[in-house]
Amino acid sequence: MSDRLNFLYPRCRYYGHKKPDYLVFNANLQEFAQRVTTICNLQTSGKLPPEQAYAQIQDLWQQLQQSGQHLLDID
């Protein structure tokens, strides 16, 4: 099961400064990329309407921005 999850949801190693907030944001960024890829694949295969895919990606982007503002003090 673990191998399957690693294949479906790969995580890349973080090479930046090892601050806890940076590590958390990096994990959030990787999850964002993974979820956007899944949404795009569903839309491309016709299982998700373009408007719904756009709305979901927009929501994910807003969540990532809030995460960045909270963790990294970005204005």
Image (spheres, grey):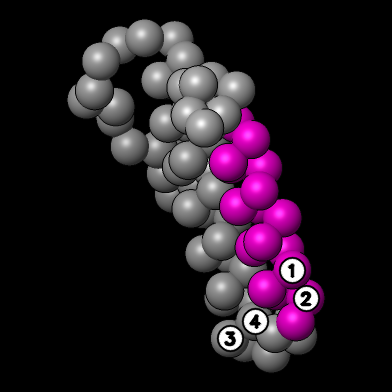
Secondary structure of residue under mark 2: helix
- Judged by depth in the image, the label closer to the viewer, 1 or 3, is 1
Q: Nearer the viewer, residue 17 or 39?
A: 17
Which of the marked residues, 4 or 1, is nearer the chain's N terminus?
A: 4
Give the residue drawn at x 48%, y 53%.
Answer: 33
**Residue 46 rendering spot, x and y as whole percentages:** 69, 90
**Residue 24 rendering spot, x and y as whole percentages:** 50, 22
Q: CA distance from mark 2 to mark 1?
A: 5 Å
Secondary structure of residue under mark 4: helix
Residue at mark 2: 52
Residue at mark 4: 43
Would residue 6 be visible to someone looking at this image? no
Residue at mark 3: 44
Q: CA distance from mark 1 to mark 3?
A: 15 Å
Give the residue drawn at x 56%, y 61%.
Answer: 36
Tell me: residue 72, above or below residue 61: above
Give the residue drawn at x 48%, y 29%.
Answer: 74
Q: CA distance from mark 3 to mark 4?
A: 4 Å
- Judged by depth in the image, the label closer to the viewer, 2 or 3, is 2
Tell me: residue 20, above or below residue 52: above
Q: Which span of residues is magenta-colored?
A: 51-67
Q: Quadrant of the N terminus?
A: top right
Q: Give yes or no for contact between labels 3 and 4 (Cβ–Cβ under 8 Å).
A: yes
Q: Give yes or no for contact between labels 2 and 3 (Cβ–Cβ under 8 Å).
A: no
Q: CA distance from mark 4 to mark 2?
A: 9 Å
Secondary structure of residue under mark 3: helix
- Name the disc covering residue 55, or none: 1
